[in-house]
Amino acid sequence: MDIVANLSMLFTELPLLERVRAAAAAGFSGVEIQFPYEVPALQLKEELQRCAMPLVLMNLPAGDLMQGGTGLACHPKRRQQFADALDEALSYALMVRPRMVNVLAGRLPEGVSRDKALATLAANVRETAQAFDRLHIKVLCEAINPIDMPGFLINTPQHLNELLTEVRHDNCFAQLDVYHMARQGISVEDALAVLAGKVAHVQFADCPGRAEPGTGEFDFQAMQQALQQTGYQGALAAEYRPSSTTLKSLQWLTRAPFQV
């Protein structure tokens, strides 16, 4: 199973483009970047090619979500802003060719019912799935715990499955972040029981703390076994906050069940 580095959280001691080479030197099989748009797409493409590193995943632009706002995807009054974000992501993806893109659901807007927000999100995700299907790029959605991100619309595997059912598109898949599940006391086994056959990407960090494996209580061996039992063939993405420098945090790479 390929192990990839999330460059928005790892190697942040370096400028973004330099993180690609650092990840390759450390032994990762690829990279993902939450929001790469600060770097011209051509520059990122060239650096990925120089390092022979695939871009496994990037997010669509999410508006003000990371600054505490509602974001774009589930807000009924921000449909045009979402359409603009989709256009930006499509243009960027044409150059850097990620394997997958992720749509962040956002927070439930004040005064909007959950049903209305979910319908808006499903319509936006369906449009995204259709657009990226033409590029042979998978579209993902994920559940995020409401402790770290209060008000986030999609929290549990059941929420995520409900969304995928509403979207009804063959190019829409689940992204499973096991940290966000563990933060809510949801096991990997239970999450996979709900999302069986729909998971296209897995991210991890230890819990509690969201640092590297070995700093918390999460059972990564059980995670690996559960994924193998469901026939998961995708990558595992390290999306954690290093407890020291990134390089010092990488001892887990040489231990089971990771061992690049």
Image (cartoon, grey):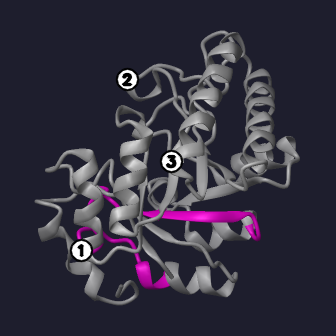
Question: Where 15 falls versus 217 (above or below)?
Answer: above
* Left or right: 73 as drawn, with respect to 210: right
Instruction: Name which quarter of the figure residue 189 lies in.
Output: bottom right
Q: Nearest the camera: 103 or 229?
A: 103
Q: Residue 176 appears at what percent x and percent y?
A: 58, 60
Dot 2 falls on a residue whose secondary structure is helix
Residue 210 colored in magenta in the image: yes
Q: Which residue is mark 1?
A: 26
Which of marks 2 and 3 precedes in the sequence?
3
The CA span between labels 2 and 1 is 31 Å
Q: Which residue is mark 2?
A: 67
Dot 3 falls on a residue whose secondary structure is strand
Q: Which residue is mark 3?
A: 58
Crowd class of label 2 (few under 14; some 14 to 19; many from 20; radius 10 Å): few
Q: Residue at x 70, y 17 (%)?
A: 79
- Span colored in magenta: 196-222
Q: Nearest the camera: 48 or 146?
A: 48
Q: Residue 128 appears at what percent x and percent y?
A: 73, 38
Dot 1 falls on a residue whose secondary structure is helix
Which of marks 1 and 2 precedes in the sequence?
1
Crowd class of label 3 (few under 14; some 14 to 19; many from 20; radius 10 Å): many
Q: Nearest the camera: 253 or 15?
A: 15
